[in-house]
Image (cartoon, helix red, strand yellow):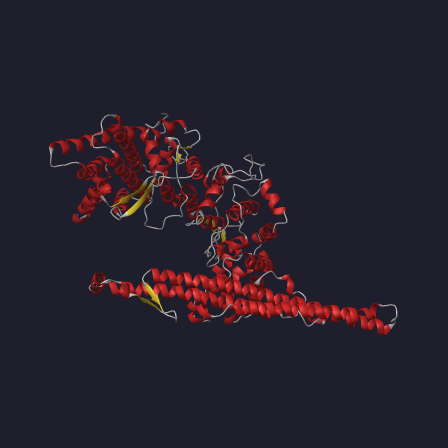
Amino acid sequence: MPTYHEAMTTDLSTLTSAADKWDDMAGEFKKLEDAYERDVHRISLGETWRGFAATAANVRFDATLREYQAAQKEAKALAAVLREAHTQFTDLRGRLRSVVGDAVKAGMKVSEQGHVAYDYDKLDAKALYAARHDPDFESTVRTREGEWHQAIAGAVKAFDDADVGVKIALETVVIDGNPVDGYGFNAEADTKKDIEEYEADHAADIATRINSGENVSAADRAELQRAFRDNGGNKDFSQTFLNSLGADGAVQLGNKLNDGAQSPDKKLKGQYQDLQKGLANTIANATRIAKSVAQLTPGSKAFEAWKKSDDADAEFYREFTAELEKAGTKNYGSNTNPLYGYQSLVSVMSHAGAKFDDQFLYELGDDMIKAENEHKGIFNTIGGGHDGIKSDALDGLLAIMSENPDAATAFFDPDVKGGEGNPERDGDEVKGGADHLHYLAGTGDGAREWPKILMATGTDMDDPFSRTGLGAALQAAATGNVPLPAGQDPLPAYTHTPEQARVMNGILATLDQGPSTEVHENLQVPIAQAIAQYTPDSHEILGGLDGEYAVNMKDGYFVDDKGRAHLATPADALVHVMRGVSDDPDAFGTLNKAENRFINAELDKLPEDSRGYSESNPLSKSGAALGALTAIREDVLNDERSGAYSDADWKSKVAYHVIGGMVTPAAIPTAGGSIVVGDALQRGVDTLAWVWGNDLKADADGKATEAINDRYLDVNRQMQVLVHGWGGERYDLETEDGRDKVQGLTDKILTGHTRGVVTAQGYLSDAPN
């Protein structure tokens, strides 16, 4: 491995000088070829020499002539490799210098050997004194030094990876791939475009030996790791590698790597997991398409025309996906414990660090839907299953899709249509978002029969992880954000694209089954998190005063004059789905907390001298939105079908969800900037959490806790505390005028609350409204 000093100072011009000499060598071989053809080879072709001797000589002369030609190709190929090496190393040196420059800007100094140390000389006397008396300063410095050291070491390591790739290419160029031809030189040396193709062939050889069950050495596995790492974003490497293996070979390799990743040996396990990531990234890079789903929708005429074109990416994509469609339904396991190609493929893809292309995910999803309809039960769990591999490959694919929100949005957008530049659908071959939503999230005819776990006794059971991928994908598709990690609250984002708003409306329309709407337990939290990110719109829909939302309910969304899309789904459908997800207390708590935060922001917009509608409308809408939540809460607690939680448990979980994290500072994005949760703007929300939390801490027995939770789940109490806490920053509550103002605001909200409760109760009643 080169040192930092070598990486920074080695004279790279020697590579181009050597390349020039190899080009000169090719020129010399050309001169020899011309002279040999003129003075020797032609003798055997003339009319004056005939017979067996002439024929034998001609064969030898032909071989020698081709040897000169092969020598030229080899020399030119060597020159090309050296020039590309110069380009690569020059680029890597530039990246290394950039990292070093960033380190220096961050207050570090870097020695000629690449050692990183904090530059105390840049501190003035005051800063230096403060640093020496800060007990945490030294540990912080050590951490930052370590981080910059790793960054520089990584940039130097990239030199080593590239150096090994160049070595492989140079060694391969001089190997005569067909020794029986007698040339002695590599007559095929001009068939490779770049260094990465040489590396891909070498990596594919190792992979093929792994697939064959050969005991591949640790050094070879390390070389395969390096090849994947060094060529992580190179499409030539990725496509050449997969062309060599084929889809069937790639699936087999995925299975072998998964087996290795189950090893109890931590070092070996880690190596195989890294190889899984490398293979996944290779597939992601190889299948990437330049245009979006909107331009080229799988199944459309434009997409099919592209696939049939002579474009290099199209040729690879066409052949690889055709192979994959066959490998996807092939059983690589046993009859009693099957392992289908799609299951193996998705397992590999789940390890990727790179995003997969939206077309590839879209078409793969369609292909899997087709496969499970043609091969019933293909994604059921039969037998013991396979460690590290999820049986329901389609749900696994949706989880992967959630990491690329744009891809998820395209897959579920009801208005995605086929045809580049053509708004018309090209026919039934295009499966749009409405089809995908109904199949995956809908009920009745045409909806998916979700896979089961088949027991040895002949019975079956639901997969406890069923629809987890779907929930993640729907959340990403509707919001444009990757799914939130556990424990993180969604913030009421203010901007969405028309595509995202269409998806959100489509989700609500698909899940809405009327007053008795039921949402699968694994969808409840992710759907609630998605709705919470549309709180500015759900607030207006439930508020029932903004006519623009009512006018656009037919389409389910609209775009305002600033280009921002808004959800405009019918209020009854929104309430039905909010009720369906609220069987889960965390889901209800998410909706409740988001609404409280938004109301606090709306309160802050009120001018201190506001009067009339400018004051009453925002307050009435706020109350109505919370009234809907009150009706939903009462419906959950009065529903005899709700058996997952006792009333006390449900209330307790909601309470702790609403309190937890309420005062954690966080920025809520808005059209004009951001709202910082935790500052005076959110004082009312923070006060609610603070008072509630203090009451709970003071409680000593469970019965009292339940009473406290009841009190704070009551919206009257929430509104009183929230407005009082907010008003403390706006008005002087020590004066009669200040108290009257806050009480008046509270009264207006509570009046709207009554309206919201009555309206939502009507939506949740089986009786016609």
**In the rendering, at what x and y percent does residue 250 appear?**
56, 58
Q: Nearer the viewer, residue 377 or 213?
A: 213
Q: Nearer the viewer, residue 36 or 764?
A: 36
Q: Is residue 694 left or right of residue 359?
A: left
Q: Is residue 531 left or right of residue 717?
A: right
Judged from this view, the residue extending furthest toward the bottom is 53
Residue appearing at x 20%, y 30% in the figure: 609
Q: Is residue 265 visible?
A: no
Q: Quadrant of residue 501?
A: top left
Work out whether 643 lies above or below 145. Answer: above
Q: Nearer the viewer, residue 550 or 159?
A: 159
Work out whether 246 lies above or below 395. Answer: below
Q: Is residue 118 visible?
A: yes
Judged from this view, the residue extending furthest toward the left is 735
Q: Is residue 190 left or right of residue 528?
A: right
Rendered-image quadrant of the C terminus: top left
Residue appearing at x 64%, y 61% in the figure: 191
Work out whether 751 lies above or below 405. Answer: above
**In the rendering, at what x and y percent does residue 540 appear?**
33, 32
